[in-house]
Amino acid sequence: MKEINELNLPENIKYSKDHEWASIQGDVVTVGINDYAQDQLGEVVFVEMPQVGDSFDEGEEFGTVESVKAVSELYCPVSGEVVEVNDALEDAPELVNNDPYQGGWIMKIKTDNPSEMDNLMDKAAYLEMLKG
Amino acid sequence: MADTTGTGGLIFKEALLWEKSREGRCAVSIPTRDVPVAELDPALVGAAPELPQLGEFDVVRHYTRLSQWNFGLDSGMYPLGSCTMKYNPKINDVQAARPGFAGAHPMIDDELSQGALELLYHMEQYLAEITGMAATTLQPAAGAHGELAGMLVIHAWHEKQGHQRSKIIIPDTAHGTNPASASLCGYESVNIRSGPEGILTPEAVAAVMDEDTAGIMITNPNTLGLFEENLREIADIVHAKGGLVYGDGANLNAIMGIVKPADLGIDVIHFNLHKTFSTPHGGGGPGSGPISVVKELAPFLPVPRVEKTVNGYRLVHNTPDSIGRMLTFHGHFGIVVRAYAYIRSMGAKGLTDVSKYAVLNANYIKAGLKDDLHLPYDRPCMHECVFTDKNQVDTDITTLDMAKRIMDYGFHPPTIYFPLVVHGAIMIEPTETESKQTLDQFIAAFKAVVKEAKETPEILKKAPHLPKVSRLDEVTAARKPVLRG
Amino acid sequence: MRYLPHTPQDIAQMLQKTGHAGLEDLFATIPEKFRINGKLELPDPLTEWELNAHMDQLSSTMCAFPRNKIFLGAGSYPHYIPSVIPSLISRSEFATAYTPYQPEISQGTLQGIYEFQTMITELLGTEVATASHYDCGTALTEALLIALRKKKKVNRVAVSCLVHPHHRQMINTYFAPAGFEMVEIPMAGDGTTDLAAVAAMDDIAAVAVQSPNFLGCIEDLAGVKTMADSKNALFITSFTEGLAWGLLKNPGSFGADIVAGEGQSFGIAQCFGGPGLGILTAQKKYVRDLPGRLVGRTRDTNGEEGFVLTLSTREQHIRREKASSNICSNNGLNALTAAMYLATVGKIGIREIAQINHDKASFLRDLLVDAGFEIAFERPFFNEFALKAPKGYGVKRQALKKKGILAGLSLECYYPALKNHYLFCATEVFSRQDMEDLAKEVKHG
C-alpha cells in the first residue's frame, strides 16, 4: 500500500470524503475513484456502472467497484443525470488501477447544480482528511 | 519410521472430461427396453445434449485422479477455525445408505415411512435436549439456511405480537451470514463491538437495544473462540425490551454437555450437523442446519411437523402460525441419519467428552504456539484459538504466506483473515478427534514455518511448493471469468 | 469412545502444558451456575453392532425402492444409479474436504465442479451455472429474488400454479417478511399454465413456470417467453425431472433468462427427499446476480491450468447485509455426483434413458386407461401424467399399499378441482411386468 506522500492526487480536480474524484467542464462532471481508493482496494476486477439516463442525488450510491476480496460502493459526488459511462471498463477494469484519472473514469453526469462542486474538497483539504 | 507428516509423491495429470471423449463410447448399462417406443411430438424434441462420451473405466480413472488432488480430512489434520473438521465416522455413511432410507420417497403415506418419521422425531428431541429447548425442526439445509429459518421465526413472532420491528443487533465478531440472513427478513443490522476482552459487554447491548429492535444474533462461543460470559445478562436486557435472542450454534462443539444454551437466555439456535455432529462436509455441502426453539416459538416452526400418536408417527401439515416451508421435503434426511447415528454412538458422556477434548486440544495449540505467533486475546479459549501475523510484520510475511506454506508440511491451513475484527487472523480449531501426537506435529510444523519466515522468507512467498498447482491467478479469474469449458 | 484418541497420560501432559489442574478448569469462563456437568437425557451409547441392528430395524419398516414399487414422482424419482457413482463419490478426498477455499489442495473438487457447470449449461442451453444450491425449491426462490432485485421498483412475480406446490409454499415463506408477492397463474383446461391470464397482470418482475409441470404436462415455453417479454419481465423456468432434457428441447433454446432445477435424478438417491441438488443456471448477463459459488478456470504462477472459486465478492462473507443471498454453501458432493452421472451416461446414454422413461410412462398410461382410468389432459408429457380414477379406486389404492405397491399420488389436496385425480410416474426402473401387474390389480384385484 502507498504511503500518503506517495499518492497521486492532481490539483485541478475535486475529492469527496468517499474517495471519488470529480472534474467539471460546463455542466458535465466526470467521476472516478482516486489513487488512494484504487490502492486500498487492490486489483480491481469489476466496476458496476449506472446506466445512461439514471439520476442520482448528491451522496447517493451509483455503483460498486470490486476487487478479488472486497467491494466498495460508489457515491455520487454531485446530483444529476448520467450522460455517459466508461464502457472500456467492462473489458479492462484494471484501468481504474493503472490510470484512475484518465482511462479509468467511471461516469459523466450532467448536473443542474454546479455549485455542489463547492461541497467537495481540494487536494489540500482531502490530504488533511486522510491524515485525520 | 516417519513420525512427521509430510507430502510428496506421485500426482497424475488428467484432462477435462470432454477432452477424453470419443464418439460412440458410453459408460452406462442401458436399461432393457421391454415396451414399444412412444414417439413424442417432434416439435418438442431437442438434439441430444453434447455430454462427453466415455467408457466406464475412463470415468473411474478420471474421478480417482481428481480425488487425489484434494486434501480431505481423512488425508490429514484440517484445523479450519469455525468449521469443526472432526473425523466423519464411516459407520454413519453405512446407515444413510441402507436401502430402506436411500430408496424412500418423501411423499408416500405416513404409515409407509414410520422408520424415517421415528428417527426424525427422536432426533428433534435429542437436539432439543442438548440445547435445553422445547422444539426442533430438521428442515433447514445448512447453517445459513437454519439461520434464515430462525430469523423468519423471530420475524413471525414479532408480527404475531402485533408490532413488527425494524432492526437487529449483530456483534462485529459474527459470521457474515448473520447480517445477510437478517436483511432477507427486512431487518437492518445494528453492529456493535466486542469489549476489550473480546466478548460483548451488557453496556454495549443496553446502549442500542430498544423497542424497535427485534433482538440480537449472537455466536457463543464467539468466533474468537471465547465464551460470552455476559450472555445471560445480555439476554435479560434484550428480553426486557421485548426482543429475542438468536444463537448461532456453529460453535456448539465446545459446550455440549457443559452448558445448555436455553439456560443462557437463547430463544432460537441453529445447529450445523456437519460440524458438531460429524457429518462429512462434502467439499462444501450438503450439510444440515436444524433449529431448536423455546416453547413460545414452537408454533412458528416450518411444516410439516412430526408428531407421535398412539398409532405411530405422522406428519402435520397445517399449523396456523408456521412460517411455512424452508425446503421441498423433510430436510437433508441423509445427513440427519448420519448425525442421529453419531448421537446414538456417543451418548451423553461421549458428547460431553467431545466438548472437553475439543477445548483441551485448542488450549494445547494455543499454549504450544503463543511464543511464535501473536495472540491478540490471551484468555482461556474454548474449541478454537485465534492468532495473528503481527510478529511477522517485519519480515513482510503475511498470514496468507504461512497458510500456504503449512500445506507443504502436510496440513490443511487454518481459517485465515476471519474473524474480521482481528487483522491477519489465523484461526485454529483442532477438534477433539486429533490426538496429542498429531497436535505436536502440527505445532512443530507451524514453528518451522515461523522460523522460515524469519530466515528464508522467499520460500514462504512462493509456497506452496508440493501440491499439484502453485498459487492461482484469482485476479484474471475474476476479471475475465471462464466458467464453463 | 473410539473416535476420541486421548489417553489418560496424554490428558495429564496436555493439562500440564496448558496450565490447568483438570479438564473442568478449562471451562472456568462459564459461570458455575449454568454448568450441567454432562447431564443430558440421551439414550445410552450403542456399539457399532448395536447401532447397525437398530438402524436396520428402523430402515426395514420403510416402503422403499427397489423392494417396493412406487409409481410416484412429484419431485423425487426412482432411477438406476450406476455402481461407479457411489464407489467414486465416497472417496474420502471428495467427501471429507471442506469448501475449496485453498485451491492448491482442492483441485479435485474444483475441476469436478467446473465440469459440472459445463455439463449443466450444455444440458439446459444456458451460459452460466452455479456450483449448485440446496434443491429446486430454493434455487427457484433465489431465481425469483434475482428478478425482484433486477426490477427494483416492482415487488410482484407471476408463478404458475403448476409449479410444485411445495416450491410455491417456500416462495411464500421467503417472500413474507420482505413484502414481495407471488401472483399465481391459473391452470388452463389442458393441464398447462393459462398464459393468457398473465396478460392482465401488471408490474411483474418475472413469469415463472415449471416444465414438465407438476401434473407432468410439457409447458409451451415459447409462449412463456413471448408473454414475459411483453411484460418486460424475466422468463424463469424450473424442472424437477432433469432427465427430461435428454429428450426435450432445452429451456435455453426458448430464451429462458434463468433456469432452476432439481438434479436428484442424476445419480442421487431419493433418501426421503434430501439432500437433493439445486441447479441454478442463467444467461451470462446475470452472472453477477447469481447467489452461491462459481468455479472459474485460471492459471497458476507456473502457467499451469487450474481452477478457483471466483466472483466471490457477491457472497455474504464479504458483502454481509448487502450480499445477494445468505447462502454460503452448496450441495457440492451432490453436484459432483450429478457430474459423475452425466459423464457416465454421456450423450448416448442420456438420450436412451430419457426415451425409455417416456416409453414406459406412455405404456403405463395406456394400461391404466385400459383398466378404467380416464386421461385427464391430452398434453404431451415426459414420465409423469395425471389420470382421473375409476369409482372406488381410493379403496383399491389402500389395498395395494398393503402389497407394497404405491399407485399414484392423490392430487385433490393440491388442486381441489382435481377430485379423484392421481399423478403417476414410470421410469426405466419399472419392468413391463411391474406395470402389467399394477394394471391387473387395478382392473381385477
Image: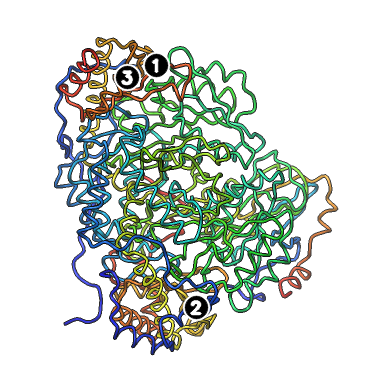
Residue C247 coordinates in the image, percent (x, y): 29, 26
Residue C165 coordinates in the image, percent (x, y): 46, 30
What type is the residue that disc 2 sits on?
Answer: Thr
Q: Disc 2 designates what residue? A: B388
Mark 3 and mark 2: span between their CA atoms? 69 Å
Do the residues bearing badges 1 and 3 touch, measured as CB atoms within 8 Å? no
Q: Disc 1 designates what residue? A: C420
> Regarding mark 2 in the picture, which secondary structure is present there?
loop
Name the chain letter of the residue that bears numbered label 2.
B
Mark 2 and mark 1: span between their CA atoms? 67 Å
Q: Disc 3 designates what residue? A: C395
Q: Nearer the viewer, mark 1 or mark 3?
A: 3
> Regarding mark 3 in the picture, which secondary structure is present there?
helix
B16 in relation to C443, above or below: below
Question: Is residue A107 visible to us here?
Answer: yes
Image quadrant in which you'd find residue B217: bottom right
Q: For the N terminus of chain B, which image quadrant?
A: bottom left
Q: Which of marks 3 and 2 is in front?
A: 3
What type is the residue that disc 3 sits on?
Answer: Val
Binning the other alpha carbons within 10 Å of mark 2 as few (below 14), some (14 to 19) or many (20 upward) gives many
- Discs 2, 1: same chain: no
Which is more N-terminal, label 3 or label 1? Answer: 3
> Regarding mark 1 in the picture, which secondary structure is present there?
loop
